[in-house]
Image (cartoon, rainbow, N blue to C red):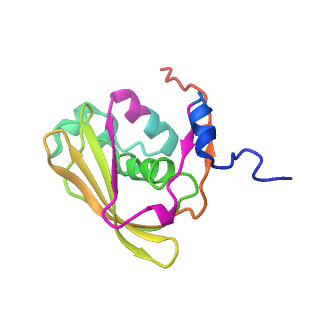
Amino acid sequence: MNKTKNYVSYAPEFLEQSRINLSINVTADEIAVGDKYSIKRFFTTQDIIMFAAVSGDLNPIHLDEAYAEGTRFKRPIVHGAFVMSLFSKLMGTEFPGLGTILIKQSLEFKAPVYIGDTITAIVECVEKKGKAQLTMKCSAINEKGSEVISGTTIILAPRVKIVREPFKLPRVAIKQ
């Protein structure tokens, strides 16, 4: 079976002519130390319920307002793994994107993220080793400008350009 049949060879004229939404990665050779990308996400109650259902993390600090009220946080907080998944989304789909492999990650959780917060996740290339190993500085900042997560991730960046239509995921709904 041809494993590359879903991929389209990179050609600028193809991109100019195409009217579909494409996913395009950034190769290791195209990345320089200092390059950075960011994404934003607003966290809702529905997001937290969905993450709890998928991950199995049913800790009441995330789901039970009465329980959370008795903690130092005073209200439910977003799962730390959910917030840090913004880095995975960013590096796996945008920068470098398709073909990226995570090797090692070290993160510090500095402050809680609450339902209703908007978080900006930022990754910056701070070191290049060999042909494709990159060290990325990771930072998540809330709408007040406070850093809630910081750390580093070592990745293997893709060495070939990948251009393809994004995967189409099914719609998911929560029923109580």
When asked about the image quadrant of residue 40, the answer is: top left
Q: From the viewer's perspective, is residue 172 above or below residue 67?
A: above
> Who is closer to the viewer here, 31 or 134?
31
In the image, the segment drawn in magenta is 21-49
Q: From the viewer's perspective, is residue 164 above or below residue 170?
A: below
The answer to whether residue 102 is visible is: no
Picture coordinates of residue 53 (x, y %)? 49, 37
> Who is closer to the viewer here, 64 or 152?
152
Point 14% across, 45% down: residue: 145
Point 17% across, 43% down: residue: 73
Q: Residue furthest front?
A: 13
**Does the segment drawn in magenta span residue 40?**
yes
Image mark count: 0
Classify residue 136 as left or right of residue 144: right
Picture coordinates of residue 82 (x, y %)? 39, 46
> Who is closer to the viewer here, 38 or 131?
131
Q: Residue furthest top?
A: 175
Q: Residue furthest bottom?
A: 130
Point 18% across, 38% down: residue: 143
Picture coordinates of residue 84 (x, y %)? 36, 52
Classify residue 83 as left or right of residue 174: left
Picture coordinates of residue 165 (x, y %)? 62, 37
Q: From the viewer's perspective, is residue 99 above or below residue 129?
A: above
Classify residue 155 as left or right of residue 36: right
